[in-house]
Amino acid sequence: MTKQMKAVLLDAKGGNLTYGESAIPTTKPEYLRVKVKAVGLNPFDYKLINMQSIVWEEYPHILGVDLAGVVDEVGENVEGFQVGDQVFALTNCKEKGTFAEYCLVRADTCTKKPKEMSWEMAASLPVTGLTAWSALKRKFHIEKGKSIFIQAGAGGVGSYAIQIAKAHGLNVLTTCSPKNNEFVKSMGADHCIDYHKENVVEKLKEYTNGKGVDYILESVNGNNITTNWEGCNLNAQQLTIVGAPEKAQPSYHGFTLHESILAMGHLMNNLELQRDIAKMGYEFLELYATGKIKSNVTKKVPFNKLIENLESMKSGHTVGKIAVIMD
């Protein structure tokens, strides 16, 4: 095997991304070496470039946190995995990442991929799919017959959240541009609100017969929470994955506010949380096995188009998920 691999390299903190080569990593105890088949692109990836709380010991650094691939080598003290296993994972952003041909991942933070699942779908799950799962299943404990408002239903998290909610029998409301109505409807949305022209709160009331929604998943701006609550019912819950509102309002009626970021386990280097993400992967696969969940990948690109597609995500208008195919 050649000792070098293709990789996207970050030259310095706050620096530039370039295509180049890096040494193929050597497997270490408790880790798997994975030959990467596909990676998912996330806003989190480019945000890491300038994130002051994360500084790597050496450069160039390899970014990327979503991964799907084949176990190429098994380190010491690893149980339950063998060479040839197909896996997906959310990798530790404090270590070298997934934008390369090979990546080291702790074995106990990996989820085994069903053979029938495409590489691109598996690579789309760790950040967006499991963020949606964590919000709806772990925080909200969603119940059949209730209603949920999902901001930005055409986005990566939103499009998986719509499917999870619909599979559990909820009335699903979302915002999107009219050009994305067909996509979010295909994901399972019952009602699409044109946030450019329509009053969101009024529509939340209208589509719930005046009651207001039971759950709100906020994925655009935490400050929206200060107006979202007007479209909630008395016992509603809101969850933000984009930060809390800048100002708390004491006049909110009795809803519960959650704040969640799935990558926090990695930012804090918390192994228990990292392992729990892998566990959520298996929970998600139980629903996938019923046929009620499909891929939200709308664009597949080759490795040599990774940088330009990551750059394109800064507009904030990516539909579904972009997957990079390594082969």
Image: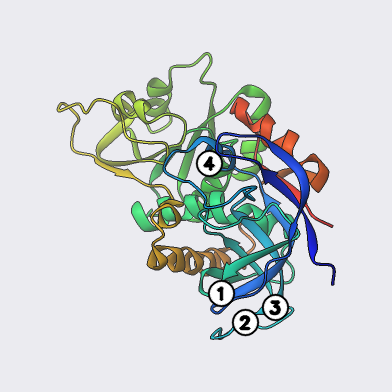
Task: Answer with the quarter of the image where residue 116 lies.
Answer: bottom right
Query: Looking at the picture, does residue 78 appear above or below residue 257?
Result: below
Q: Amino acid at mark 4?
A: Leu
Helix, strand or loop for disc 1: helix
Q: Secondary structure at mark 4?
A: helix
Contact flag, marks 1 and 4 (Cβ < 8 Å): no
Which residue is most to the top?
197
Amino acid type at image mark 3: Glu
Q: Earlier in the sequence, mark 1 or mark 4?
A: 4
Sequence order check: which comes first, mark 3 or mark 4?
Answer: 4
Mark 3, Cα crowd under 10 Å, few <14 / some 14-19 / many 20+, is some
CA gap between label 2 and label 4 equals: 30 Å
Q: Earlier in the sequence, mark 3 or mark 2?
A: 3
Residue 107: give its label.
Answer: 1
When the figure is inspected, residue 116 is found, relative to residue 253, above or below; the finding is: below
Vertical placement of 278 versus 324: above or below? below
Instruction: Give whichever of 41, 57 is nearer the camera.
Output: 57
Q: Distance of mark 3 from mark 4, alpha carbons?
A: 28 Å
**Where does residue 263 sit, x and y in percent of width and height?**
46, 51
Q: Residue beneath label 2, please?
A: 81
CA distance separating discs 3 and 2: 10 Å
Is label 2 or label 4 in front? 4
Amino acid type for the residue under numbered disc 1: Ala
Disc 3 marks which residue?
73
For the C terminus, the image quarter is bottom right
Residue drawn at x 45%, y 69% as measured from the top left: 275
Q: Toward which corner of the image does residue 209 lie, by quadrant? A: top left
According to the image, label 4 marks what residue? 48
Looking at the rendered structure, the secondary structure element under dot 3 is strand
The residue positioned 40% from the left and 50% from the top of the image is 145
